[in-house]
Image (cartoon, rainbow, N blue to C red):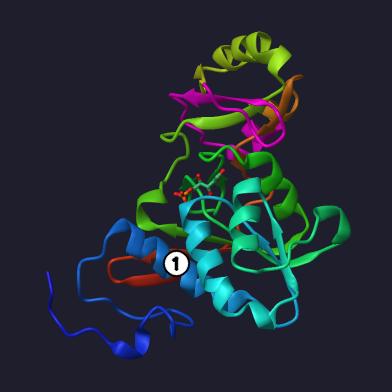
Amino acid sequence: MTSTPPDTSCSFGKMQHLHCEYSVEMTQDEMKQAAAEAALAYVEDGSIVGVGTGSTANFFIDGLSRMKERIRGAVASSEASATLLSAHGIKLFDLNEVDELLVYVDGADEINPALAMIKGGGGALTREKIVAAIARRFVCICDESKQVDVLGRFPLPIEVIPVATTQVTRRLAALGGRPELRHGFITDNGNVIIDVHGLRIEQPAAFETTLNQIVGIVTNGLFAHRGADTLLLATPQGVRELHAA
Ligand code: 5RP
């Protein structure tokens, strides 16, 4: 569905803000890359950058590598991202060495109009929540397939201490979901993930609080109390920039 020739001043490398209009059909990966490239405009010279996990965050790491001389380094939210950052020659900082980050850039599995999210599809939710907690600004980078009105179509990931798996599963079922152990998966912290299917989460902050009270749960994948501040949402028409109210 090509209608007008592409505006070359808006190539990924040069895109700064909102952003260019695309006139050709884009793949999901191209949209993820477009959102990731747009997030580079939020990286301040001389700063340490919080970096998320997943395929969209990997595109961001690729972009960051092109400006690595301008930043001090990065804090990674997973071993996988740390490995990729190191491979690009970006200096890694331990979270305990850093008091505050100006920006944390990460993807999401779902995001609602209030910029509350479900995260943890890659199993990195605990460190993602910790890094996000010390960031002044959370920039979420997504393709448009992640945008929903009500969270819950994507199974909600819950990181659980292994000995508590059975009792936590029972508690989650009592809350109305269909908990399923993610077989063969162990998190960077040595725990298991239970994915909860069939939820319709109308009040994400309240539900996040409820889940936080269940003994044995390390972290739940709702990012509502600390949602995104900015969403860079890639669509075939370009990257839309939205801000939390
Ligand atoms: C990892 C995450 C990711 O941000 C989420 O799963 C989105 O991944 P992708 O960018 O590959 O679609 O929360 O724990």
Q: Residues within 10 Å of mark 1 (few under 14, many from 20)?
A: many
Q: Secondary structure at mark 1?
A: helix
Above or below residue 41? Residue 89 is: above
Residue 160, horizontal then vertical, whole percent: 68, 24
Q: Is residue 229 visible?
A: no
Q: Residue at x 23, y 83 (%)?
A: 6
Q: Amino acid at mark 1?
A: Ala
Q: Position of residue 59 (x, y in %)?
A: 48, 63
Which picture quadrant has residue 212?
A: top right
The magenta stretch spans which residues?
184-209
The image quadrant where one finds the C terminus is: bottom right
Residue 96, image x, y percentages: 86, 53
Q: In screen coordinates, is 149 left or right of 190?
A: left
- Is 181 included in the stretch rendered in magenta? no
Q: Is residue 159 above or below residue 144?
A: above
Q: Which residue is mark 1?
A: 35
Tag count: 1
Residue 87 image position (x, y, % from top left): 60, 62
| Quarter of the figure that contains the N terminus | bottom left
Residue drawn 39% across the image and 58% down it: 143
Lateral position of residue 156 relative to residue 130, left or right: left
Picture quarter containing residue 204? top right
Q: Is residue 204 magenta?
A: yes
- Residue 244 seen anywhere in this rendered image of the structure: yes
Q: Nearer the viewer, residue 226 or 38?
A: 38
Q: Is residue 7 left or right of residue 177?
A: left
Q: Is mark 1 within 8 Å of ligand 1?
A: no
Say which residue appears at 48% left-offset and 49% top-offset.
112
